[in-house]
Amino acid sequence: MIPTPTRAAALDRLEAFVPHAARYAGRRNFDLGAGKHDGVSGLSPYIRTRLVTEEECTRAVLAKHSPCAAEKFLQEIAWRTYWKGWLEMRPEVWRCYLETLAEQNKTPSYEAAVSGNTGIACFDHWVHELTATGYLHNHARMWLASIWIFTLKLPWQLGADFFLHHLLDADPATNTLSWRWVAGLHTPGKHYLARAENISKFTNGRFDPKGRLNESAPPLPMDFVPERQPLHLPPDPTPRGRIGHLMFPDDLAPPPESMGKITATAAFVPPVLETTSLVSAFLNGAVNNTLHHLNGSRLDGSLPSAISDWISAEKLDFLVVSQPTVGFTKDFLDAVQLPIHLL
């Protein structure tokens, strides 16, 4: 069930899904259990690392289906871009999340939740599935988050952190803002309540937590209203001489052809998030596979000194890296302050 962390596997997965893209809308909400998630694409871990890009997925689907027939899948692809762009213009939400997370206490109720020992069968099952496979159906993610917040009354920040540690497709923007949406903080007054009837219907009767859920909870009170900030896009660089391309696990896609011919490629895995061994293996596998095909180098140790050594060894004149969006990689790069051009 664990996806192979290679671009070849990503393209195979995309090819297998494309014929079924028009049926996605009618099947996507059904969570039939681990190993039976055949109503969704299974592409999210690959898109998370950009072993396959959003544009490639869109083009492949539209080559076989009309926009109307594949509308729901195309919308889901667009949601990821929306979340990342929304947070990019409101970085205060990310900073506030991290600050509040650091203040949370991990109570016995929290420990029961993350070990799958709450006594709510569906919730406990999803926790075990997530920790065992690194994946959870999107509908189950919504149910779990809602039960976490409104029935178990645990801080949403701890739930978001739990997902970030365990999901193969974890994305800081999508994850943070989705949890805030469930809580009623992203769209003020609009929250998502898990209901026993809905769970029973879309799990084909595998679970029916009737009487176990808080189905009348109000949304969480607003914490703050973030101000939208203007985007400060970097100027288009003018590559010259020997060009080096530096990659990180959340963007392993090649730079645009306008950058010119890349002389050397390297990747670095920042020590920014303590993930599970399963997630770490997937991310490292994706990095290693990409470097193998590009004959690139993996940088270890202190990033500034490792890059300096790499630049000297390759005699590079120009260094580029895809611009990171709000999240751990951007925080890391801001801290080390590298003299690089962001694409």
Image (cartoon, grey):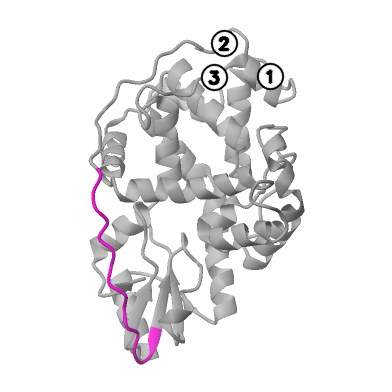
Q: Where 78 sits versus 114, above or below?
A: below
Determine the image quadrant of residue 130: top right
Residue 246 picture quarter:
bottom left
Q: Is residue 286 magenta?
A: no
Cα–Cα gap, marks 3 and 2 = 11 Å
For residue 241, side relative to residue 46 (left or right): left
Residue shown at 31% from the left, 75% from the top:
236
Residue pointed to by mark 2: 212
| Along the line of sight, the residue nearer the viewer: 337 or 118 | 337
Residue at 41%, 26% in the rendered image: 183
Label 1 SS: helix
Image coordinates of residue 207 in percent, x first then y, are: 68, 20
Q: CA distance from mark 1 to mark 3?
A: 19 Å
- State the residue position of label 1: 200
Type of the residue with mark 1: Ser
Residue identifier under label 3: 118
Q: Is residue 170 above or below residue 99?
A: below
Q: Amino acid at mark 3?
A: Thr
Mark sitting earlier along the chain (2/1): 1
Task: Say which quarter of the image contains residue 318.
Answer: bottom left
Q: Secondary structure at mark 3?
A: loop
Q: Residue 259: x and y, percent? A: 41, 81
- Whether residues under marks 3 and 2 lie with C-beta atoms below 8 angstroms apart, the answer is no
